[in-house]
Image (spheres, grey):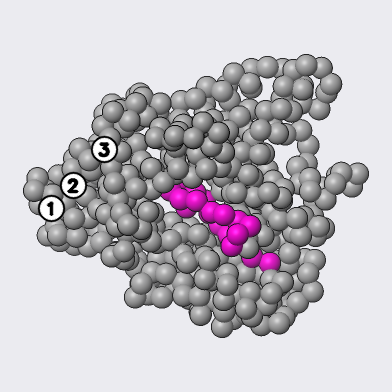
Amino acid sequence: MDDYKHGMLMDDELLAELRKKFAFLDYDPDYGERLFFDNSGGSIRLKESIKVREKIDLLPDCPERYHQRANDFNQIMEKGKHDILNVMFGAKSGSLITELTASQAMFAMVSAVIENVNGESAVTTNIEHPSAYDSVEFYCKKNNKEFRVAEVNKDTGFVDPEAVADLIDDNTILLSVIASSNISGNIMDLENIIKAARAKKTDLYILVDAVQHLPHGTLDVERIGIDGVNFAPYKFMASRGIGFAYVSDRLSKLPHNKLIAKEDSVWELGSPTPALFASMSAVIDYVCWLGSKDNKDPNESRRKLYLKGMEKIILHERALLYRMLEGSEKIEGLRHMDKVQVFADYPDLTKRDFIVAIGIDGKDYEQLRKDYQEKGVTVYERVNTSVYSKRILEAIGLTGAIRISPFHCHTIDEIDKFLFITKELVKS
């Protein structure tokens, strides 16, 4: 994929076909036409993902029974677990955490490590989402561990492997690092960060926040040595109401909240929700469908189809990102537009997810978000008065930004429309 440094658009026929699979793609049912460019806050929904959830939720049965419908529910959940662990993450072992949110899943993983592993310190970075950063700080303070924070490289917007490794010693028990920035979209070099970290402490527990990254990219958790990684289905075309996390077998062996009679690998408390597993499976089905479009092997594994589908998504989004930044003969891109600043604008697009942070000279960020809204564009302001944004923004030298986060179901025409609107706002 790195050969396509500027990406590669899906053909028009495929793009038209997949766009029909999404709900309210270019309009809001109550407020009319709009461009939804806030997919980092909660993505456009895949119709089938919501339909299958509703269909199953209408059934009154409980999965913890023995009649036929209960068996059906259990098969749905087993498929969902397999889809997430094996197909998404490429894991041949490990367990699944289910919580109301991905943030809760992160807290569960962090607490299991810090409260049960002998050692004196834990490491994270200053560009983590609060759920990752705060959970490490909270449990360090609770358990008298030293809380260490690696700083992002302000010149690049990435966390350097050496900056992480320098904080790890024989008494460090945990490293928590984000997969990609939720403000700039910069993809962290996890493979080399983990390699450098384990060179300092081989049995270190490593957790990854992949909430922003997984809708735009992939992870092979066992190959690169991750012990736990969380994600949020509602940011990946599926339903609200659940957060998932992969956990390695060795992490599951640590004491954690569970029913005493159940195996260590079981993290669920109470009756699970089959419909939410089905909702996520529908998303994975969709990605595999994309991967099957030019597949010649009828026996191709579901994991390989998923990777091929995600490759199409990655390359299409990269092409849209290039268009947004560089523009065309029709309209200049954000990099070349008068008074527009693109923050943390790393030039190598192969190391970026489809998230862009900008500002317009002299424009207040909150007002600018409202101005975009009035012109039919949904974006989001990240400002340092927000507990979710302050530390991350200031870590890369910003006080605020407008975050633009389109999705792979968008088109070149929609990118151009956004650019024309941005130019109008510059002139206003």
Asked if residue 134 can be seen in this view, the reply is no
Under tag 1, what secondary structure? loop
Task: Tell me where residue 418 sits by quadrant.
Answer: top left
Marks 2 and 3 close (CB-CB < 8 Å): no
Marks 3 and 1 close (CB-CB < 8 Å): no
| Residue type beneath disc 1 | Glu
Residue assigned mark 2? 419
Marks 1 and 2 close (CB-CB < 8 Å): yes
Disc nearest the viewer among 3 and 1: 3
Q: Is residue 220 magenta?
A: yes
Vertical comparison of 141 with 349: above or below: below
Q: Which residues are magenta?
A: 205-224
What is the crowding at mark 2: few (fewer than 14 residues within 10 Å), some, or many (at least 20)?
many
- Distance (Cα) linking label 2 and label 3: 13 Å
Give whichever of discs 3 and 1 has the lower sequence position: 1
Under tag 2, what secondary structure? helix
Instruction: Report the residue at 52% width, 22% height from top.
Output: 51
| Residue 386 x %, y % | 44, 58
Residue assigned mark 3? 411
What is the crowding at mark 1: few (fewer than 14 residues within 10 Å), some, or many (at least 20)?
some
Give whichever of discs 2 and 3 has the lower sequence position: 3
| Residue type beneath disc 3 | Thr
Q: Which mark is residue 332?
A: 1
What is the crowding at mark 3: few (fewer than 14 residues within 10 Å), some, or many (at least 20)?
many
| Residue 381 x %, y % | 35, 53
